[in-house]
Amino acid sequence: MKLNTLGVAHKIIAEKVKAGDFCIDATAGRGNDTSFLCSLVGETGKVIAFDIQQDAVDSTKALLQSKGYDSIAQVFLDSHSNMDQYAQENSVDCITFNFGYLPGGDHNIFTTPATSIPAIEKGLKLLKQGGLMSLCVYYGGDSGFEEKNALMEYFRTIDSKQYTVLITEFANRPNNPPIPVFILKQI
Ligand SMILES: C[S@@+](CC[C@H](N)C(=O)[O-])C[C@H]1O[C@@H](n2cnc3c(N)ncnc32)[C@H](O)[C@@H]1O
């Protein structure tokens, strides 16, 4: 089976997230990651998701409802850079970011480093010790290279005493393959 970026991220996330956990999807989009997190945390867990587009919030809510996950997840029309207003420090098991634009939506609206880097910084504080942040860095095309370049620079500055940052790459895929990144908060 050919593994794409999301497949790689979901494999790692599934190793970590268990029933009853608390997770955040920082970029709800069409709701695929929110729904995946709900499938892992189950009825005893909780997921909150953010997106700045009403289209994305509506899609995510519809997907959650169709899968029977609407009692597990809450979806907020808000920027991920405000996620610290919705969760306590050291309380979150896993946070996902999936950068870029809304699939099937407006390609002129996409994640930008002005909000994504503050959101990551806040997310790292919200993670429990042993918690995982998964970030799929999409770039090129309509969203360009600015965010990818800023993120790659930022990842290298994260305190190595507190966090392990793994930047992975598809070595044999053409055309700006997305970059799966994993950050583990040390115990
Ligand atoms: C690649 S899509 C996410 C895909 C999604 N995870 C899914 O499963 O369909 C990126 C999303 O990030 C959203 N976004 C852009 N800036 C944001 C921000 N500051 N806060 C939250 N979401 C944002 C976009 O509206 C878009 O829906």
Image (tube, grey):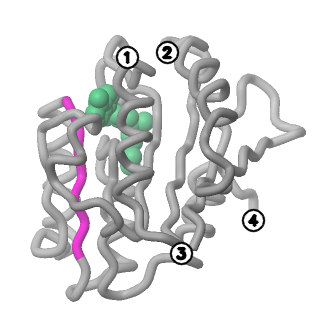
**Residue density around tag 2, few if under 14, some if 14–19, many if 20 or more, within 10 Å:** some
Q: Is residue 136 left or right of residue 171?
A: left
Task: For mark 3, give the secondary structure.
Answer: helix
Q: Nearer the viewer, mark 4 or mark 2?
A: 2
Q: Amino acid at mark 4?
A: Met
Q: Which sits earlier in the primary sequence, circle 3 or circle 1?
A: 3
Q: Quadrant of the C terminus?
A: bottom right
Q: Position of residue 131 (x, y in %)?
A: 49, 68
Q: Ligand 1, what quadrant?
A: top left
- Magenta highlight: main SS: strand
Tell me the number on the disc at residue 118. Answer: none
Q: Amino acid at mark 3?
A: Ala
Relative to the observer, which residue lies in front, 4 or 109? 109
Residue drawn at 18 percent across, 66 percent down = 73
**Residue 87 visible (yes or no):** yes
Q: Nearer the viewer, mark 4 or mark 1?
A: 1
Contact check, label 2 and label 1, Cβ < 8 Å: yes
Q: Which residues are magenta?
A: 46-52
Q: Amino acid at mark 1?
A: His
Relative to the observer, which residue lies in front, 95 or 3? 95
**Residue 104 visible (yes or no):** no
Compared to 149, does 57 lie above or below?
below
Q: Is residue 4 left or right of residue 70?
A: right
Which residue is the site of mark 3?
14
Which residue is the site of mark 1?
107
Which residue is the site of mark 2?
143
Which residue is the site of mark 4?
1
Q: Which sits earlier in the primary sequence, circle 2 or circle 1?
A: 1
Q: Quadrant of the N terminus?
A: bottom right
Is residue 69 inside the magenta stretch?
no
